[in-house]
Image: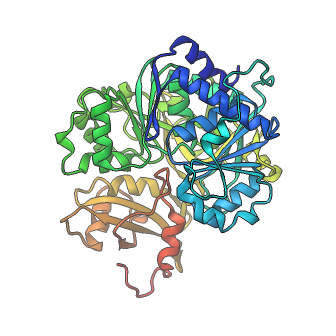
Amino acid sequence: MDVGYLLTNSAHKFPDRLAVIGDEGRYTFRTFDQRTDRLASAMVKTGLEKGDRVAILFFNGIHFAETYFAAVKVGLVATPINFRLAVPEILYLINNSQSKILFYDPAFEARLKAVQSEMAAVRWFVSPHSGNPSMATDYEAFAARGKEAFFSLPRLNEEDPCQLMYTSGTTGQPKGAVLTHGNIIWNLFNTISGRDDQPGERAVIVGPLFHTAALNNHFTIQVALGGTSILVRKFEPASLLETIQTERATVMSGAPALYNMLISHPNARAFDVSSITKCTAGADKLPMETKERIMDFFPNIQGVYDVYGCTEASPCVTILKAKDSMRKDMSVGKALPFLDACIVDGDDAPLPPGRVGEIVCRGANVMEGYHEDPEATRAALRNGWLHTGDLARMDDEGFFYIVDRKKDMIVSGGENIYPREIENVLIGHPAIADVAVVGIPDREWGESVQAFVVLEAGQHLDEQGVIDFCREFLAGYKKPKSVVFVDSIPKNALGKVLKRVLKETRNPPVAGDDSVKRR
């Protein structure tokens, strides 16, 4: 089986059911399948061959969906590009992937044109520019070159590359994870089981499709199960609430920060969201307070599915089911059925329940490796296990709890301190809206804890108040030694905190120096 077959199969079973809804229109499975066939044929006619990369720089919408499925149907490797990146970063991904064709939204025309000559491998540019002067061929004109149906498709195996998915690049240059058709399909099986997905759901997809969570866990699963994907181009709380109400969406997914912004909108309660029967969350910590807010706002859900994974795992590793969401606070659930996961120490020896170590996994969902980076591949895939770089523990029932990133761990006076533990405490303060904790140099202890705090509107809290609050719940060495009050916490497109940016923002002083701790 290959990923393109998922669409073809659903088109045969549910030809007249709505497959995709976006700003560009509303297509049934029959129409969606036919249009991707035509576009795939046009790609082949340009001379693209199996294994060539297809760069996709679109916002969420039908153009992204069509380009993606057209590419994978004929053995091309879909290479989604993060549209929030700066031009040099976009250029790096296109050149690193050696993409031969670039599909892009007209909004990026001017920026891409300035670096067109630097895109070493790109031979074709395609964009829905509606006839305006452009460096690209018009999208519809390009697709019209193809045929609606194929009689001879290239033979694809589960081992064939399907996606080149770049990591978010929170530190250093992004790495391209090569995901095969088999990786995507086995992730699909895992996610359907872990999230109790059902045929015919109507999923509002807000997360960016350039990431594995939205593309593989939400969009591809709806295609496979004959569901409807409501593709949201840009997150705006009022607009999203109206979409849920109008389209009678049944499934909602997003980072905890997205849910908080949605629920906090002043007119949120004016919309009918009773159609939503399932909410899933991922990308960041999900405090009990946020779960309770979500369950209060969406009256017909039975809990919140909390998903943990990484790009290299296509992405799912564990899922906390809705039925366990209230009794297993801060857990990300159990390992999914068709993979194995455990906690290991620095020597890769398994650790017993309760001990903190690195979470590793193995299974048919794990990537083939990093694109043209054998050294990084060897570092990530050791002894048959994917090393996630995340610190976690497991309880006696097999439920996993993410503690922190290995690289974010703070070592103070020889003690390991996990920023996430402190963040979980501080987010419980009624005056704190958001928080991130980092380690800063300390002359005496090596490192000390610094908290970046965003206050709720109209609330007041000083540095000592933050530290005193922590004293009630944490050992003395874990308390912040300094607090910086900020307007917002920088996050990437997936809702993950950019701690590197926080550290660079203010060039934190060595603890013990006199300094201004607010900005």
Q: Is residue 359 visible?
A: no
Percent across and percent down for residue 144 are 66, 35
Measuring 56% from the left and 44% from the top, which residue is drawn there?
A: 211
Residue 443 versus residue 152: which sits nearer the camera? Answer: 152
Compared across the picture, whether 5 is left or right of 334 comes to: right
**Residue 365, how many percent across, how many down?**
66, 31
**Residue toward you, 440 or 175:** 175
Residue closest to the eye, 414 or 159: 159
Residue drawn at x 75%, y 25% as measured from the top left: 158
Q: Is residue 510 above or below residue 67?
A: below
Question: Which of these two is toward me, 19 or 96?
Answer: 19
State the image coordinates of residue 246 (x, y, percent, origin top left).
28, 32
Q: Quadrant of the C terminus?
A: bottom left
Is 8 positioned to the left or the right of 374 in the image? left
Residue at image coords 63%, 32%: 69
Identify the image quadrant of the N terminus: top right
Q: Residue furthest top?
A: 13
Instruction: Establish if 498 lies above or below 361.
Output: below
Rendered residue at 78%/31% (across/down): 160
Horizontal placement of 57 versus 204: left or right? right
Q: Position of residue 292 (x, y in %)?
A: 26, 39
Q: Is residue 496 left or right of residue 163?
A: left
Say if residue 222 shows up in the picture.
Answer: yes
User: In the rendered view, how is the structure colored?
Assistant: rainbow
Q: Image height check: is 195 above or below 425?
A: above
